[in-house]
């Protein structure tokens, strides 16, 4: 019978660390890369309606998965002794849980509004492109509703240019919008020139 050689504890520890790094990359790295690509390719033409909501869902799920990966890593890798490390472990888990809840909340709260979105009229409009990002471009409409509350919604470049042109021709331009209140996803937009 052959003598089977077991890997040393050092090798097992290194493999375990590699497995955790791979797990973290799967839960955090890949979704982050996908969200950047998803937002970059689809943020313009499909930023409204159900596809706009799905973009928000996808983006929030990425951050939820990152928080979950951090929780799993913390539970598995951060020792519970001494007391300082246990406190650090608890703080990391609590903060990551709060982050996951904060990103899940708007998605869950907007689900009932998918069939019946909120509706409002906006005036004092501004149409602009948000160039604060190096590789992403967002086009927005900004306006005040009848109650004096300001809203900002992502729109397509085409709608932004149309709105800018109409606003130049008529400074009293207003819009009727339907939207999801928690993710601020614009569902429909109607220009009112009267």
Image: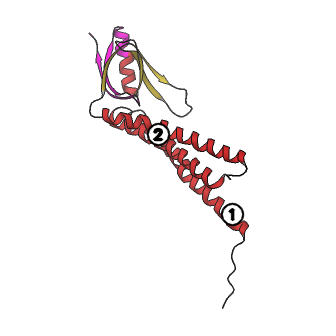
Q: Name the side, left or right, on which 15 lies relative to 169.
A: right
Q: Is residue 107 above or below residue 20?
A: above
- How far separated are the C-alphas under marks 1 and 2? 33 Å
What percent of the width, then of the height, locates residue 27?
A: 53, 51
Check contact, mark 1 vs mark 2: CB within 8 A. no
What percent of the width, then of the height, locates residue 12?
A: 68, 67
**Count of labels in the image:** 2
What percent of the width, then of the height, locates residue 40?
A: 47, 38
Q: Is residue 182 magenta?
A: yes
Which residue occupies 36% across, 31% down? 48
The residue at the far bottom in this view is: 1
Picture quadrant of residue 84: top right
Q: Name the side, left or right, on which 84 lies relative to 121.
A: right
Q: Is residue 191 above or below residue 79?
A: above
- Observer-nearest of 23 and 191: 23
Q: Name the side, left or right, on which 72 lies relative to 181.
A: right
What percent of the width, then of the height, locates residue 110?
A: 36, 34
Which residue is identified by label 1? 13
Q: Residues within 10 Å of mark 1 (few under 14, many from 20)?
A: few
Q: Residues within 10 Å of mark 2 (few under 14, many from 20)?
A: many
Q: Is residue 46 visible?
A: no
Q: Is residue 99 magenta?
A: no
Magenta extent: 165-194
The residue at the far front in this view is: 83
Give the label, 1 or 2, closer to the camera.
1
Q: Is residue 121 above or below residue 83?
A: above
Which residue is identified by label 2? 60
Q: Name the side, left or right, on which 183 lies relative to 83.
A: left
Picture quadrant of residue 3: bottom right
């Amino acid at each position: 019978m052959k003598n089977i050689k077991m890997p040393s504890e050092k090798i097992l520890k290194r493999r375990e660390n590699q497995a955790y790094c791979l797990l973290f990359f799967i839960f955090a790295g890949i979704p982050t890369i996908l969200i950047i690509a998803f937002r970059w390719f689809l943020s313009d033409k499909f930023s409204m309606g159900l596809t706009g909501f799905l973009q928000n869902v996808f983006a929030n799920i990425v951050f939820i998965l990152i928080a979950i990966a951090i929780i799993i890593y913390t539970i598995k890798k951060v020792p519970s002794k001494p007391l300082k490390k246990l406190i650090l472990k608890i703080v990391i888990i609590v903060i990551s849980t709060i982050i996951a809840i904060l990103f899940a909340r708007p998605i869950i709260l907007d689900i009932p509004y998918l069939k019946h979105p909120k509706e409002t009229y906006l005036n004092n409009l501004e149409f602009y492109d948000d160039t604060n990002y190096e590789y992403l471009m967002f086009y927005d409409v900004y306006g005040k509703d009848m109650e004096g509350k300001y809203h900002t919604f992502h729109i397509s470049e085409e709608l932004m240019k149309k709105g800018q042109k109409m606003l130049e021709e008529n400074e009293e331009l207003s819009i009727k919008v339907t939207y999801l209140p928690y993710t601020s996803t614009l569902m429909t937009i109607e220009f009112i020139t009267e």
